[in-house]
Image (cartoon, rainbow, N blue to C red):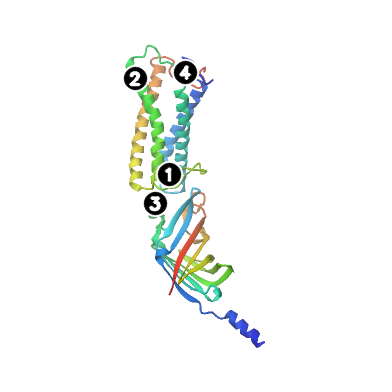
Amino acid sequence: MKILLFCAFLAASPVLAADWKMDPAGSRLEFVATFEKNPAPGVFREFDARLAFDPEKPAGGSLHVTVKVTSADMSIPDVNKEIRNKDWFDYAGFPGAEFHSTELRRVEGNRYAARGTLSLKGVKQAVEVPFTWASSGDGATIEGELTLRRGDFGIGLGEWKATDTIGAEVKVKFKVKLKKA
Amino acid sequence: MFRNDPDTWSAAAKLFHWGMALLIFAQIALGLLAVSWRLSPTKLDLFVWHKSTGMLILALLALRLAWRLSHRVPALPLEMPAWERAGARVSHFLLYTLMLALPLTGWVISSASGVPFRIFWTIPLPAVAAPDKGLADQFATIHGWLVSLLALVLVAHIGAALRHHYVKKDTVLARMLPWSPS
């Protein structure tokens, strides 16, 4: 019984996961919307990720991401001018987005998932962020992609709610290079 | 059906002429609507329609030119003065040139603006220029001047056809009409 209790304690207790911080030079956060059935890619030039992670015991870890929404760049000047408006990202009202994990788990092999809350344009939504983990020397890289529905976050209001010209789904892709903090 | 007699246009020639006439008028209307519409899903759709119609016109023009260059066209009336013959030749040459130059300059604008495009939402159109706002603006200006020139040449073309029919009372317009004998 004592042993059982001890095992339960081990499983539930936070392990001492290593702290990782992002190396901005090797990191990218992209999003791909669709425009008239074509991919319309963009990037967030400024964002930061902090990870507490032990690949063998992911449960005790955490992932926190902050995104400077106003650093979005879709590379077409007219589009960049438009997305800052209230109907889209609303730079003035919601300059930042955040993700905070509540649970990290291993899916299989080097594939993991971070369940947590995404706050974007004033909307909080539970999302699961899948990622792969690759360590090399004293660094590591996490990579992944997920699909969000822009309508859930009020991105594209009024007549832009219609999804035939600008599609409903937006793919978010990230590659984050990490250094031990 | 495909050959032109000395005095008549074949059914193929008439189909090219009137089909493309219809497309070109629709195309001018779509272009004017697309640029003047406020930014909205409708504007984006109008541009897809305009660009798609432009590519359709370009494809039809290739067929039409191949046809035109391999067939004799009906003779102009013998009594036509030399300046009128020259005017007809120049305006027809301009019409063909503009039917080519307008889609091509439009293609450059579309490419240089960096906006991805699929013809009728299906066939992706490859870019002929790298994204470059300056180049896009420059070609948009040229595109605008070309369409103004097209409008002028069309006024001359239609005016001349009506003059042939109502003033000179010859068969130049009548033989191109869809219901005339081929």
Tell me the crowding category of disc 1: few under 14, some 14 to 19, or many 20 or more residues within 10 angstroms, Cα based: some
Q: Is residue A53 positioned above or below B46 on the image? A: below
Lower position in the chain sequence, tag 1 or tag 4: 1
Seen in the picture, residue A134 relative to B151 is either above or below; the reply is below
Which residue is labeled 1 in the image? B127
**Local SS, label 2:** helix
The amino acid at mark 4 is Arg
Specify whether residue A159 is in view: no
- SS at circle 4: helix
What label does residue B175 carry, if any? 4
Q: Position of residue B51 (x, y in %)?
A: 45, 40
Pick whichever, B136 or A1, lies toward us.
A1
Q: Secondary structure at mark 3?
A: loop
Residue of label 2: B86
Tell me whether marks 1 and 4 sit on the same chain: yes
Q: Which dot, 4 or 2, sits closer to the camera? A: 2
What's the residue type where badge 1 is placed? Ala
Can residue A26 be seen by looking at this rendering?
yes
Q: Chain of mark 3?
A: A
